[in-house]
Amino acid sequence: MDFQLSEENIQKIGGVLGAEPKKYSNYFRFEMQGEDENHRAVVEIHPSIPIGKSEGALVTVFTPNTNLQLQHCSGVVLSEMMGEVTFVAEYAGKITGIILEKGGSCSMYANVDREMLSGDFTQLAPEVMLSGVALSLTEVALPEPGSSEQPGAGA
């Protein structure tokens, strides 16, 4: 398995999101509520679960209008200042990230070229610039390209 979220990191995630994690047999669940009753999200984190022929960390987000899932999560970045937690996965130089905000807001950026994370954002088309900026914080949770080092938590 590539990466596993520790129970300590799960507690830190809860602190940033302002939500107490509830522990179940093999996963943790967070329930977040915004000021508006329709602005809510439920997040389930499986630190280790069979995914196909391998094991990996799984993050699933449920909102009133959306279900998102990140398989083989390879890192997490916590930003207390922004009240955000970013879960990230990388495959073949492509990054996918789910960004959760305190109060239940959620964004997902998928299949983003890794080089966009540290390039000159002003050279990107406006339509794709936001994904590079939003996921640029994840570089600390990703191994160097070509490295055999395991990704981890920027917690």
Image (cartoon, rainbow, N blue to C red):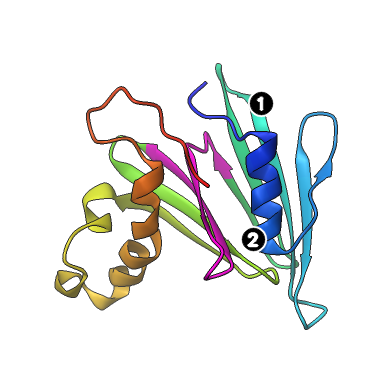
- How far across and down, in percent of the image, does residue 16 sit? 64, 60
Q: Is residue 120 magenta?
A: no
Which one is in front, 21 or 134?
21
**As displayed, is residue 84 above or below residue 50?**
below
Q: Residue at x 47, y 52 (%)?
A: 97
Q: Residues within 10 Å of mark 1 (few under 14, many from 20)?
A: some
Give the numbered dot on residue 16: 2
Please state which amino acid type lies under the numbered disc 1.
Answer: Ile
Q: From mark 2 to mark 1, how far is it between C-alphas? A: 24 Å
Q: Residue at x 35, y 71 (%)?
A: 130
Task: Report whether 32 appears left or right of 119.
Answer: right
Q: Residue at x 64, y 33 (%)?
A: 6
Task: Report whether 92 appears left or right of 69.
Answer: left
Q: Quadrant of residue 8?
A: top right
Residues in magenta? 70-90
Which one is in front, 20 or 70?
20
Name the front one of labels 2 and 1.
2
**Residue positioned most to the top:** 53
- Identify the secondary structure beneath mark 2: helix
- Please name the residue that numbered disc 1 is placed on: 49
- Identify the secondary structure beneath mark 1: strand
**As displayed, is residue 70 above or below residue 34?**
above
Asked whether the beta carbons under mark 2 and mark 1 sit within 8 Å of each other, the answer is no
- How far across and down, in percent of the image, does residue 91 sit? 36, 36
